[in-house]
Image (cartoon, grey):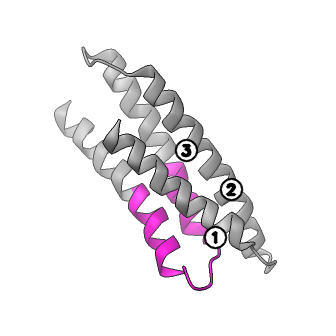
Amino acid sequence: MDFLHNFLVFLHILGAAMIVGIWISRIKNPTVMPGQFHAALLQLLTGILLVGMNEMGDGDINYAKIAVKLTITVVVTVLAFIGQRKYKKDQPVSRTLANGVGILAVVNIAVATMW
């Protein structure tokens, strides 16, 4: 069970790194890449699984923190979905949308590490 938990944490962190890494690499000409949407889905899924595993075990869960992180993750996922659809259709992706995905992902990392 420890291996599964650690693997899910690894995938969760990897998803955050992908979102932020792609955003930083495109900072001069911000857009939303399809990989950011997939990484947001990865974060959402692994986050839900991690909370579920903690519920099954004897882990102490901070529900307020989980609610804030889930809300931010859903917003990032929706923004990334909208952005990647525009990108695939060769439509312009606004700087606000692209930067929103990256900045909210950074905020989510901050909540995870500092709360």
**65 is higher (above) or lower (below) than 18:** above
| Residue 53 seen by the camera | yes
Point out the image quarter for the C terminus: top left
Say which residue label 2 marks.
79
Quarter containing the N terminus: top left
Mark 2 touches mark 1? (CB < 8 Å):
yes
Q: Position of residue 30 (x, y in %)?
A: 62, 78
Q: How far is mark 3 from mark 1, CA to CA?
A: 15 Å
Task: Please indicate whether residue 9 sits to the left or right of residue 95 in the image.
Answer: left
> What residue is shown with label 3?
73
Q: Amino acid at mark 1?
A: Val
Residue beneath the point at 23% across and 42% down: 6
What whole-number distance in Å separates the C-alpha atoms at marks 2 and 1? 9 Å
Q: CA distance from mark 3 to mark 2?
A: 10 Å
Q: Quadrant of residue 33?
A: bottom right
Which residue is at the far left? Answer: 2
Name which residue type carries label 3. Thr
Mark found first going from the N terminus, 3 or 2: 3
Instruction: Please name whichever residue, 39 or 22, is drawn nearer the observer in this view of the structure.
Output: 22
Look at the image and tell me whether residue 84 can be seen: no
Residue 22 on the magenta segment? yes
Instruction: Tell me where the magenta segment starts and ends, as one range.
Output: 15-42
Give the percent coordinates (x, y) of residue 99: 61, 67
Tag 2 secondary structure? helix
User: Tag on residue 32?
Assistant: 1
**71 or 3, nearer to the observer:** 71
- What is the magenta segment's predominant secondary structure? helix
Crowd around label 2: few <14 · some 14–19 · many ≥20 (10 Å)? many
Vertical order, 115 against 37 (above or below): above
